[in-house]
Image (tube, rainbow, N blue to C red):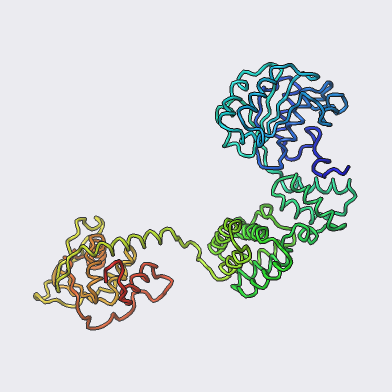
Amino acid sequence: MYTALYRKWRPMTFDDVVSQPHITAALKRQVAEGKTAHAYLFTGSRGTGKTTCSRILAKAINCLHPIDGKPCLECEICKAADAGTLPDIIEIDAASNNGVNDIRDLRESALYTPERCKYKVYIIDEVHMISVGAFNALLKIMEEPPEHVKFILATTEAHKVPATIVSRCQRFDFRRIRDEDIIDRLLYIAGEEKVDLTRDGAALIARLADGAMRDALSLLEQCMAFSDHIDPEAVSNAAGIAGRDYLFSLIENAADGDAASAIMTVDELYSKSKDMSRLCDELVTQLRNLMLIKTVPDKPELLSCLGEETERLRAVSEKLSLGEILYKLEILQSCAEALPRAVSKRTEFEMSVVKLCTARRADGYNISALEDRIQKLEHQLRNLKSLPEPSEHEDIPAAKSEPAADIKPDKKPEQNNGQFVHCPKWEEILDRLAEKNPGCVGALKGSESYVCGDRMMIVVQNQFFLQLLKSPDNSLALQEAAFAVTGTKFRIGAKCGNVSRAPEAPLKSDNADRSPLDDLIEKARTSGIPIDGAQ
């Protein structure tokens, strides 16, 4: 009868277990010294060796002739355990035996001594599936078990196991198996099975297995049924994933902003029955590679790609900033979450591909900070409803805070014979104000300033901006900017009227220096569209 590869090549001793030396060394020493615990908890992701090590440990502590803590594999106990006919090693699937009555039956059977072995070993797989009542029933016997009973609990979700259970076990955390170890193991098994497996093909299988040896062996078996020669192309076809050329075409299309070519590529892949979820996962992996190239360019060992693909990835990374790569990763992560629920997976994926090709975000662009600033502006706009209508000429409330102590006036204010004259340093004051309060500068765009002694009169174009200017925070910032430039602590007033002429030069000539909040205010000023009832 044919046996699946993952069962045929399941490790028989601790030395055969891959990538878990921190666990196998400790277990071997405990068995060799006769100091095994009464309860163990094995945790880790799927396919990392939890159940395998449970069986080896159960076999080793009952072996008649153990060798340095390892089962001999030759005695009658080892042979019966390998054949699954040993009554004293009981495996329980907690997914289907998770009730209180099941655990009560276990407690009753545990009272009886072993039939053939020194210890009766209970291996409870996926123990996190046990109900709360069943855990309570299990708790007492795990705390004070009979001398002839040992428990080995295995789970992929240790956080669901009650702390009272965990505290009574020796816990071992299984790591994801390294790709190098999976590759070596696959090449060894392929050689024993007389299969033509290339190292690049094994590397692709290892990457798709995501640290699970069982998944890697299952995929190898699937590839063996598909082709006699297993290379990356055969693995891609057998697994229903995008070939490498298709994958890099999509990445390059996203970097170049070529949405039309990307959609055509997706259409071709879909016609070949490529799985959209797997393709999305592949793109996430490659964008992760681009992120690492940008972040740690001198660590190629962190990349999940074939050797010859590294230079191609570097070429793509030069077209994108780190911020754009992170933004595209966010798009694909959202797509991966939405695909299982999507009515049409193809449409969902195509939408994300279009976003990849058209959406861009600059490095260091803090979207959270921008959202906070917009919320503050909206709050200010709503508060304008309750403010009184401004008169034609109205002083701005004096700021309560004093200007910075390190700024010293360089001259006394001039009286100008009691007449207001144009402020010659108004542009400098606005530039200084833009450093601390760019939103207020946006409100003053196109305004003029006149001074008379220690008074400053600002003429603005719109009553909406007059109300915004009356904010204590804005008036304080303006007062400090004027003080820093002129050395005079002005009493500031404002009025709404026609400005005789526009400023000689725009406040900001480079659009890259404009604040997003400036654009929002300018749009509100010019559109005349009501915002929460305020004009």
Outermost residue, left side: 417
Q: Position of residue 135 (x, y in %)?
A: 58, 28
Which of the 4 quarters of the picture holds residue 84? top right
Q: Position of residue 347 (x, y in %)?
A: 60, 66
Which image quarter is the N terminus in? top right
- The structure residue drawn at horizontal position 75% and vertical position 35%, both measured from the top left corner, is 52
Left or right side of 94 for 60: right
Left or right side of 366 for 320: right
Instruction: State how many labels appear.
Output: 0
Q: Position of residue 491 (x, y in %)?
A: 16, 65
Of residues 338 and 371, the one nearer the viewer is 338
Outermost residue, bottom side: 501
Q: Position of residue 403 (x, y in %)?
A: 23, 58
Of residues 23 and 316, the one nearer the viewer is 23
Of residues 304 and 535, the one nearer the viewer is 535
Which image quarter is the C terminus in? bottom left
- The structure residue drawn at horizontal position 62% and vertical position 36%, both measured from the top left corner, is 129
- The structure residue drawn at horizontal position 87% and vertical position 54%, both measured from the top left corner, is 196
Which of the 4 quarters of the picture holds residue 479? bottom left
Outermost residue, front side: 101
| 305 relative to 272, above or below | above
| 285 relative to 6, above or below | below
| 294 relative to 24, above or below | below
